[in-house]
Amino acid sequence: MKSMKKIGCFLLSLLTAGLLFTGCQGKKDVTIDVAALADALKSSVPFEDELAEPNEAAVTNIYAIDEADIAAKKIYVGSGATAEEIAVFEGKDEAAAGRIKTAVDQRIADQRSAFEDYNPEEQEKLSDPVIVTTGKYVILCVSNDNEAAKKCIDGYTKG
Amino acid sequence: MNSQKNFHKPPVSPKVRRHRRKRRLILGGAAVVLIALIVGIVFLIRGCTAGSPPESSSPATTTTQPATTTTESSSQTTTQAPTTPATTEPTEPQGVDDSYFDNACFIGDSRTQAFMMYAGPANAADFSSKGLSISKVFSDKTVKLDGQELSVSDALGKKQFGKVYIMLGLNELGWSYPEIFADRCGDLIDRIKETSPDADIFIQSILPVTAARNDRGDYINNARILQYNELLKNLCKEKQVAYLNVREAVEDENGCLPDEASSDGVHLNKTYCQKWYDYLKTHTNAADYIPS
């Protein structure tokens, strides 16, 4: 009887530990083709502006990100007519992705300030841009159609 | 007194021993099955949660009051548009390479900002910003340089440049007194001569807008742009600096920006920014472009 109780307690502990472990490891790491997602956003989301890739040197003026943090990236920016933008980053690791996310937030804050007097109509897009972080990836899309952007991103982030 | 407990157990019969062994085997088997089940559940749950939505967040919305504009009141001119100057001959038909602009500085508004972003030289100083006007050049801190935020005028004092390219005027087209715009551009030229006495200064003509944008009927129109460009050309003659007619790199036969060049009629796309840069690369000798 005592041994039955001991075995029962042991198995219960094992079950509890297993379920806890499952809870901590809930998210499966996804792998995203950064360029493909950026291109998909460009083609599937309706933009007013003509987006194009900036020069490599100009990226550091746009995003204050240490190059050592970036494993891959693809960016499309507007001509200045609008605040529309696409940026997909793969960080070297999740910690790097956290720093990239901070830089993306700062970019949005800078754009809000820049467009405040210049073209206040763009504030609506900048008030609620689509910013998604998953694992090592940070994804930004500034447009008039957040639903289209989210739908496109979901297609690449769901395993 | 003997306090030791007697742990001596009575002998166990073989039958009881067999029974206990059998029980242990059954329990052991059950434990193995249960462990296998737990591991299986763990992997199953991990596989199912791969489809869970990632974390999404948006930055906190800032509440900012729109700033009061300080430009002059807008008024559309009805003056006859002067004719476009003849095509300027290039001094470097083959074009210089990007390194030529390593000691250059570009001052301008959102059009110059897009130029620097899409096509401009990688190592040149970028003193452009959205909405920059000649009135802000001396007052607003629009340049981030070495961790500091400076006005264009102050930023010019931080480094000596070999060439300075300026394109301003689009945001000043609504001014009631265009001559004030020209006077203040003269102040900027003086400031550059003070801070970079050996620099070639290029005042670039204001680029046109598309016909559709022109036809909206407000102060942003090609006739007004040509008027401002004449003022700039006269200023360059007075100050003996180069007037670079870059608009000829992008305008069509009617003096308008082609529709294909811009999504809003004003801001150039990447292709046309590259045409602009190609023009700069082939028109480099400042002395050739000082109006006489």
Image (cartoon, coloured by chain):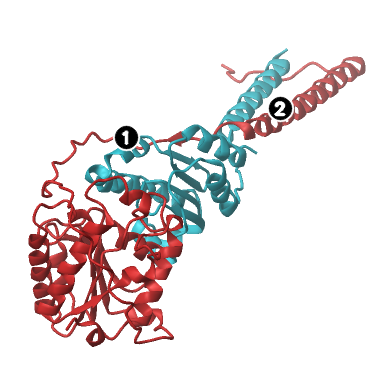
**What's the residue type where badge 1 is placed?**
Ala
Determine whether, in the image, residue B198 is placed left or right of residue A132: left
Q: Is residue B158 visible?
A: no
- The image shows residue B291, relative to residue B256, as above or below, that is below
Residue A123 location (% of width, % of height): 31, 38
Tell me the colour chain B is drawn in. red
Question: Closer to us: mark 1 or mark 2?
Answer: 1
Determine whether, in the image, residue B10 is placed left or right of residue B48: right
Query: In which quadrant of the rendered view does residue B166 lie?
Result: bottom left
Query: Which residue does the image show at 92% across and 15% down from the upper left?
Result: B15
Give the residue number, with chain letter if any, for mark 2: B41
- Mark 1 surroundings within 10 Å by alpha-carbon count, few (fewer than 14), some (14 through 19), many (20 or more): few
Query: Which residue does the image show at 43% across and 36% down from the upper left?
Result: A144
- The image shows residue A32, relative to residue A12, as above or below, that is below
Residue at mark 1 to residue at mark 2: CA–CA distance: 39 Å
Q: Residue furthest front?
A: B80
> Viewer-proximal residue, A137 or A46?
A46
Q: Are marks 1 and 2 in contact (CB under 8 Å)?
A: no
Q: Chain of mark 1?
A: B
Give the residue number, with chain letter if any, for mark 1: B60
**Which secondary structure lies at badge 1?**
loop
> Viewer-proximal residue, B82 or B124?
B82
Tell me the colour chain A is drawn in. cyan
